[in-house]
Image (tube, rainbow, N blue to C red):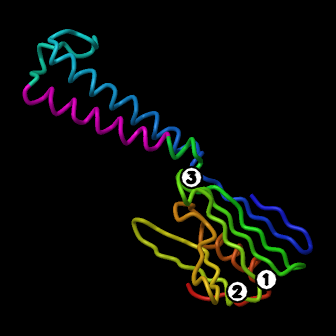
Amino acid sequence: MSWRSEYIWIEFIAGSRKTSNFCWALILFLGSLGFLVVGISSYLDRNLLSLFPSQQINFFPQGIVMSFYGIAGLFISSYLWCTITWNVGSGYDRFDTKEGIVCIFRWGFPGKNRRIFLRFLMKDIQSIRIEVKEGIYARRVLYIESRDLGAIPLNRTDENLTPREIEQKAAELAYFLRVPIEGF
């Protein structure tokens, strides 16, 4: 999602609050909770879940392993829920040609570097660079090449843009900033 005028371009970056992250966090939470309940029911020798009779699962070694997987899954699920709650990775890119300033803002994890804010002059931008890696884990990233700060990514690495979309986005941004495009 972006907003443009004659002098200003603002690109909003979606963070961790995506439907897929909600689904994965919920599935992982429910699955790990199920593993933990089955492990505990095998220890207590009681039926806490009607799907699995506790007599079929021995506490040693199956019950211990299932309890371990349940606890590990709850930790991973809580990590996912925290990233969703804090909306890690969200922010915006603001390009102002009238004042010649670029502002890049992202939310991180809580702590000292929760707010990531870069502000630099447009004249320091050397080019727009596209990095494309095809294969099983395809990756298409758009960078700003700056004199002082180096390569600054503008989109999320897990954002699945088609080659045409990232090429169009790079061309529009390069035209707006009056800089060349590099790489492929």
Task: Judge from the rendering whether residue 154 lies leftward or rightward of residue 28; answer left or right.
Answer: right
Magenta-drawn segment? 60-81
Q: Amino acid at mark 1?
A: Leu
Q: Quadrant of residue 183?
A: bottom right
Q: Residue at x 72, y 79 (%)?
A: 120
Q: Amino acid at mark 3?
A: Val
Q: Would you name the residue on which mark 1 appears? A: 177
Of badges 2 and 1, nearer the viewer stands: 2
Check residue 88 in the rendering and tell me which mark sits there, or answer none: 3
Q: The residue tagged with tag 3: helix, strand or loop? A: loop
Task: Judge from the rendering whether residue 50 lies leftward or rightward of residue 123; answer left or right.
Answer: left
Residue neighbourhood size for the residue with mark 3, other residues' Cα within 10 Å, grouped as few (<14), some (14–19), many (≥20): some
Q: Which image quarter is the C terminus in? A: bottom right
Q: Residue at x 76, y 89 (%)?
A: 123
Q: Would you name the residue on which mark 2 appears? A: 125
Task: Judge from the rendering whether residue 118 lies leftward or rightward of residue 57; answer left or right.
Answer: right
